[in-house]
Amino acid sequence: MTPFLTQVAQYLYRTFGDELNRIALVFPSRRASVFFNAYLNELVKSPIIGPETITIDELVARMSGMQISDQISLILHLHQVYVSETGHDESLDDFFFWGEILLNDFNDIDKYQLDASDLFQNIKDIKEVETRFDYLSAEQKKAIEAFWGNIGKADGSENKDKFMAMWNKLPAIYHRFRSELLMENAGYTGLVYRKLIEGLTAEKVEKLDADQFVFVGFNALNKCENKLFKFFQSAEKGLFFWDYDEQFLNDPIMEAGLFIRRNRIEFPAPKHFELDAGKQKEQKITLVSVPGQVAQAQVINYKELFENEIEADRFDDTALVLSDESLLVPVISAAGSQFKQINITMGYALQDTPVYSLISLLIDLQKNIRKLDGHTAFYHRPVLALLKHQLISSAETKNLVVEILSKNKIHVRQSDLVQNELLRLIFTPQPDWKSCAEYAMAVIRQLGLQFASHEDAPVNLEGEYLYQAYLAIQRLSDTLEKLSTGKLSLALFFRLLILHLQRVSIPFEGEPLTGLQVMGFLETRILDFKKVVLFSVNEGKMPKSTPVHSFIPYHLRKAFGLPAYEEHDAMYAYYFYRLLHRAKEVVLVYNSASDGLNSGEMSRYLFQLKYDSEVRPKEFYFDFNFKSSENAPISVSATKEHQQKLLDNYSSRKLSPSALNTYLDCKLKFYFKHIAFIKESEEVSEDVDPRLFGNLFHYAMELLYADFVGAEVQKDHIRALLLNKHKLEQVVKAAFAKEYYKDKDLNEIKISGKNILVKDHLETYLTQLLKNDLAFAPFKVVALEGQYEAPFNIDLPEGEKQILLGGTIDRIDETDGGVRIIDYKTGRNLKLNFKGVEQFYQRDKSGRPKEIFQTLIYSEIFQRSTGKNNLLPTIYKIDDFFDDEFHPEVIYGSERLSYKLIAEPFQQSLNELLSEMFGADNVYEQTEDDRKCRTCPYDVICRRG
């Protein structure tokens, strides 16, 4: 295999010898010039002055003397022209997106030297096509007639009218925009190309310094490039070298040869240059299916796929080529264990770094500022994300996170956040885009001091990320400042900043001619390697399918010779097959998993290789059958240490009835919570979920009856409460202060948004509960949210042990019928009847009466701690509040339950349960009912979420 660039170097060295400095070589990319010089260096036997090597864009810029402006400044300038020409006072925010589209269209118009007035002509009579466009072919005229014919047939509509109004203004916008840019001697790429070609003559080409300009390895030429080549050709100062494979050159159907067939005829290679395209029959091609995006990277470590081991002694031994550049880090990680030297030709996207995520969070922070009681406050989500960010996190920020979560701060006051200089800087509101730009740079400068490294220190990646981000923001700020866009909104600045940062690539430093080559697909143009591993060869990635945003409809693009999707696909096909045809071994990897936007379909090029290629590829399928394998059940066998931990914990502190219910629902959940002490993750709760609604209701009820503890409540007292709307509102606000804002001492409570509805619901339920209580008055309030505990002896093989059971009883009141042990339940579909105690212990049976079980435990604890035995377990179920007759009584069989009726069998069953819980021979297993796992905080550990 003789690389194409080696063949070119050999010809030029034979032809020009020691006078290579008289020629200049023009390449499609800078990478090609590096490889060419390396090949030339291997041929030269004594020191000489080598030829100049440049890219086509550098040649055009040098010959034109014009400067290519950046995208953002061009769009801002275009907006000014648009407003002036149309008279529409459209904001820059609204204009920016379609301004990008318009700029791309103007770029195409100039690269292909179209008459904008003709292109944007409103053809009202199809007959005009014949006379106005006499320079076009019959096929092109037909395409124009097809488009304007359809437009003419379309009924009048608002969208059509808007399109035509804009279409008619485009010629004036184009010409004015072009002329203003030319006055500044600047422009977009297409304009620079066109300006050069329109003023170029053969005489000017002859005056260029180099005797010959050698154009190497081009493919798809726009009209300006084609004319530029012709100028050099007519001045006899141009040599042209094309790389191709006879297979797709001679097949007119093969899209890969679309451009090269024409180029070879128009600009033939030197007579004595004979291209060696390589013999494809000697190749080994392997198609590899991998079910997963990142998993593709591991292919390079699977030696069975390769005929020979991957070598990287020379720069052209092996290339790992990425169709999807997001695979860069996984591929480097996979290759790092094998190769000491890796040359990464592409840059590392700034948007994949922690600095980009930090700036995104700063933008979110500035977007979500409000006034809270006259004080500046920030929305909790970006605040928490910033405080936890790896570049910001510290002991101080961790304490702030705990405080925000514990107090459920939806909006965090600025004064609560300024703990140090960095945080003071971050949590400062910015009024306009200029201050925002300086704000972002100031934060980066402050962080830069933390990550500054000494000269002899190892590479500091964070410092490099910060430096590149700082430069990018500075450049954007300078661009916007020059154009004096005082109307630039904060929203648009944030959009421009994100767009700008997404285009920043951090270059890797290294020796380009050493080690394994890792590169993007388009960087492989005219390069050859002995072994090629190409990743993400999926339809949509190869060829890359990007939506074409354009004001110029498809028919008109075809009619005027502008590139459409067919040309785009043909260009990719050429690069794909050209990369393959000299390689001895090719491994093509595609992601077969269909998830998200990925269809799991192999590229059309792989199908072509399978069915049309002379070399039949081998196929290899990786199959990671994750979905079919079930998660193994998790269980933990109890030990003496577990038993002792439980006994130590609950001999002095209370084991709650809810903990017993947890044990009955899922032993493993009980283990996580009460033995392993794995805490549930805390989050700021913006919405009032069922659990929080229950807490609000409980605390409001406690406050409502607080003045009656130890006293008798008469019907008149309840009627007075029902009339006291202010009291109801007070207790609800106090409940929000304690349960929602986690600060019961808050004086000013402003309930807003969806919480107004929650407040109204609470007041409605509280009012109805009072109405229901009229039926039970008079009654004496014994306790509200009363704390009760009692000792329980449990029988274990090693002897009798004592523990404490206890908890908070929502309400205890005394009526003529007995003492009611009341539990408020805001859950839905609860049953208040049961037939026997055995129902409480049916772990995996749906509808286990755990609410009744909990109320009976409270009754047992109260009886043991007070000696009272005429107890009535009662459940105030919110579902039943609005029934015609409210019946909160627990029904045992068919009669109202008095605890003494069931006390003896319940005590016995409870003792058996406690003996099992505290036994050393227990096994903490998962529940068999996975419906319980849907709301379990430990579902990730169990892998049932």
Image: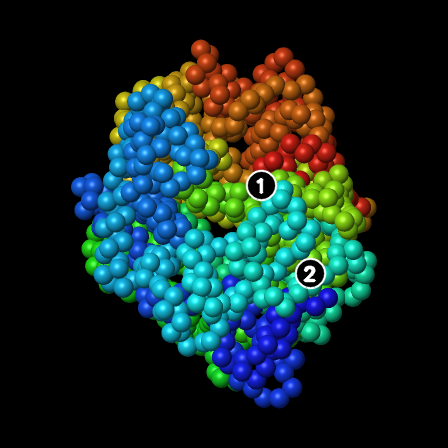
Q: Is the residue marked by circle 2 packed among few (<14), some (14-19), or many (20+) residues within 10 Å?
A: some
Q: Earlier in the sequence, mark 1 or mark 2?
A: 2
| Label 1 CA crowd tier, 10 Å (few <14, some 14–19, many 20+) | few
Residue 515: tell me if it is visible.
Answer: yes
Q: Which residue is mark 2?
A: 277
Whether residue 916 is situated above or below residue 262 in the rendered picture:
above
Judge depth for marks 1 and 2 and give the one in front. 2
Q: Is residue 781 above or below residue 895?
A: below
614 and 621: which is toward the camera: 614
Question: Is residue 573 visible to the viewer in this orientation of the structure?
Answer: no
Q: How many marks?
A: 2
Tell me residue 373's x, y (percent): 24, 47
- The quadrant in which residue 758 appears is top left
Q: Which residue is mark 1?
A: 596
Query: Dividing the picture into quarters, in which one does residue 479 lie?
Result: bottom left
Please tell me whether residue 233 is drawn above or below residue 741 in the rendered image.
below
* Residue 93: x %, y % from top left: 29, 46
Q: Quadrant of the N terminus?
A: bottom right
For marks 1 and 2, give the CA distance.
Answer: 40 Å
Identify the element where label 1 is drawn: loop
Which residue is drawn at the image coordinates 69% and 44% (left, top)? Answer: 608
Query: Is 744 located above or below residue 439 in the figure?
Result: above
Q: Is label 2 in a helix, a strand or a loop?
A: loop
Judge from the rendering whether residue 578 lies leftward or rightward of residue 352; answer left or right. Answer: right
Q: Horizontal and vertical percent for residue 412?
A: 35, 52
